[in-house]
Image (cartoon, helix red, strand yellow):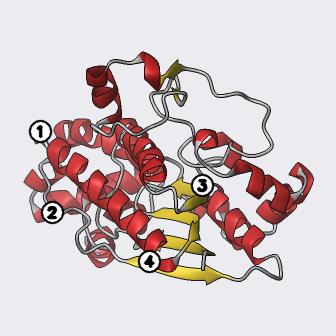
């Protein structure tokens, strides 16, 4: 029997799923490809965060787990080709929660997923975050861009980083380079569930992620996205130590470097650990060292 599940990949403590915008775009297209390859699974909502992914899926338990694992496998192959890191997500766990159909549990699950970007202080509303379904619901914007059917097989493979040829030709590739979620997410079901934009906003603003942001002092939240810091690290290493990367630094230099990251980017130990490829304990130790 098909049911609704909230699936969350384990948070990477010492690395990033997505190092730059291209990585996000590739993953967005891989979600679309997976939706086309697995019609027995219905995508209701999802979000790609720097070091983890959330999805709300409808289907049989085995099928929704296979959906995520196949997506992870596809993305791992891309990641290995780009960064030379093998088996990147091999040990990455997956938490699967059955969502009851009563007591507005599905609404809360969708809102929880949508609000991850707000809780991370990346934006003030999910609709401002492009890497997921934040702008997929209650919008009059029609998908524009280039129909996949208008592209040659070679161009489509190059743009999607995949040779998959079962995608509907009517689907379009946006100017930003990815298939927008509104073309494969079950938008109508989600909108019928929430009924009105106002009711959806109520659940967004009352979600646990929204409360987390309210309860935490804003000054303690990351001021810059992980990808922004990551893009600046080489120049900072060169400027401070005349070295190309964090891995080349000596222990004392690493301690100074992470303190500079904290000072220049208002980063906390969790964020420093992600961008530097450290465990939280290692990042905290370097920050506390003299």
Between discs 1 and 2, the one toward the N terminus: 1
Instruction: Identify the residue position indicated by label 2 in the image.
Output: 252
Disc 4 designates what residue?
62
Mark 2 and mark 3 residues within 8 Å of each other at the beta carbon? no
Q: Secondary structure at mark 3?
A: helix
Picture coordinates of residue 218, whole percent (x, y): 65, 60
SS for callout 4: helix
The earlier-in-sequence mark between 1 and 4 is: 4
Taking the spot 13% from the left edge, 58% from the top edge, the residue there is: 86
Say whether disc 4 or disc 3 marks the residue closer to the N-terminus.
4
Taking the spot 87% from the left edge, 61% from the top edge, the residue there is: 202
Residue nearest the viewer, comparing 81 with 205: 81
Relative side of 74 to 94, left or right: left
Marks 2 and 3 sit apart, C-alpha to C-alpha, by 34 Å
Q: Secondary structure at mark 2?
A: helix
Percent x, y for residue 91? 25, 75
Is the C-beta separation of discs 1 and 2 under 8 Å? Answer: no
Look at discs 2 and 3 and give the one toward the viewer. 3
Residue behind mark 3? 117
């Amino acid at each position: 029997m098909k049911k609704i599940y909230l699936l969350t990949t384990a948070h990477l403590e010492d690395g990033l799923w997505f190092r730059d915008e291209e990585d996000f775009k590739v993953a967005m297209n891989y979600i679309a490809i997976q939706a086309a390859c697995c019609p027995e699974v219905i995508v209701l909502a999802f979000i790609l965060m720097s070091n983890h992914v959330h999805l709300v899926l409808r289907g049989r338990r085995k099928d929704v787990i296979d959906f995520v694992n196949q997506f992870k496998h596809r993305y791992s192959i891309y990641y290995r080709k780009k960064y030379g890191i093998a088996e990147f997500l091999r040990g990455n766990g997956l938490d699967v929660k059955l969502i009851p159909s009563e007591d507005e549990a599905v609404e809360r699950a969708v809102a929880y997923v949508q609000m991850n970007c707000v809780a991370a202080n990346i934006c003030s509303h999910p609709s401002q975050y492009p890497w997921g379904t934040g702008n997929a619901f209650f919008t009059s914007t029609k998908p524009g861009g280039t129909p996949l059917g208008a592209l040659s097989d070679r161009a489509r493979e190059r743009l999607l980083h995949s040779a998959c040829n079962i995608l509907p030709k009517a689907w379009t590739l946006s100017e930003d380079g990815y298939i927008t979620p509104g073309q494969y997410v079950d938008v109508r079901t989600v909108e019928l569930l929430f009924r009105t934009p106002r009711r959806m906003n109520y659940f967004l603003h009352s979600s646990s992620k929204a409360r987390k942001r309210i309860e935490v002092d804003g000054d303690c939240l990351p001021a810059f996205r992980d990808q922004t810091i990551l893009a600046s690290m080489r120049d900072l290493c060169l400027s401070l130590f005349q070295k190309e990367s964090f891995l080349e630094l000596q222990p004392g230099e690493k301690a100074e470097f992470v303190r500079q990251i904290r000072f220049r980017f208002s980063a906390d130990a969790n964020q420093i650990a992600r961008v530097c490829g450290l465990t939280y304990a290692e990042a905290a130790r370097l920050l506390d060292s003299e």
